[in-house]
Image (cartoon, rainbow, N blue to C red):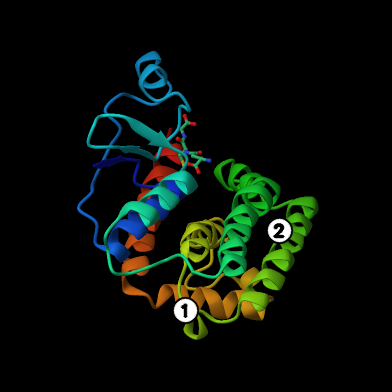
Amino acid sequence: MKLYSIPHSPYGARVSALIRLKQLPIEVLPPPEALRTEGFFKRFPLGKVPILELDDGSCLGESWAILEYLEETSTSSRSLSPKDALARARMSELARYADLHLSPNALFPLFRSALAGQALGEDTEAALRAELAKGERLIQARGPIAGRCLDLGDVALAPSILYLELLTGGVGESAVLCEFPAFSAWWQEIRNIPELAGVLNGVAEAFEAFAGAKASA
Ligand SMILES: N[C@@H](CCC(=O)N[C@@H](CS)C(=O)NCC(=O)O)C(=O)O
């Protein structure tokens, strides 16, 4: 199998992290067609990376679908999905928080402000805190990673928090995240997991290059 992604993609980073955590023999490559071209859309109907190309040549898009597929089908001894149905539902809840709450309501506006070189407006700051407060409650309910198993929910959320840091200029921990103790402690645990730290550091470097290129364009 192959994973097509771009180096600064937070969604691709989720899958790269899973590949490392489970030591899967999947090569991570740039997409074989340029993004947003007719050829890309023809081959990959959703028009986004990451894309997992299976051994029979068929393709699967959407990072969460890819994570679940790899988790279910790989023979790795490391499980990232709890056996208990409620714990599994809470894992998906965290991923959906990242995709349906934190990203659209807070990170995307932050991304637009940061790339335009604008200071954060009051609305953007308020939305960011409101979304982090939601995450704080979810993370508190799940408890520290040390007391349970790292799961796909943690893996899905981690790149979003990296982006929060990059976009708010934090190093190690952004000032705004410090206001949320359970979230902050979770982030420190994530940063201490070598496979995750390796992937996140790679995304941070790629983002700096991407943002630098945008700024000088
Ligand atoms: N919901 C999708 C989001 C994927 C996504 O937005 N990918 C971005 C890169 S981070 C992309 O492909 N952008 C290219 C474009 O929009 O043309 C997922 O979870 O995989």
Q: Residue 196 appears at what percent x and percent y?
A: 37, 66
Considering depth in this image, is 93 or 13 the residue closer to the camera? 93
The residue positioned 56% from the left and 81% from the top of the image is: 185
The answer, for residue 113, to whether it is visible in the render is yes
Q: Of the residues shown, which amino acid type is indicated by label 2?
A: Leu
The residue positioned 67% from the left and 76% from the top of the image is: 141
Q: Residue 101 appears at what percent x and percent y?
A: 69, 52
Circle 2 SS class: helix
Q: Residues within 10 Å of mark 2 (few under 14, many from 20)?
A: many
Q: Earlier in the sequence, mark 1 or mark 2?
A: 2
Identify whether 68 is placed above or below 216: below
Q: Of the residues shown, which amino acid type is indicated by label 1?
A: Glu
Q: Residue 45 appears at what percent x and percent y?
A: 45, 23
Residue bearing mark 2: 128
Residue bearing mark 1: 189
Identify whether 78 is placed above or below 112: below
The answer, for residue 9, to whether it is visible in the render is no
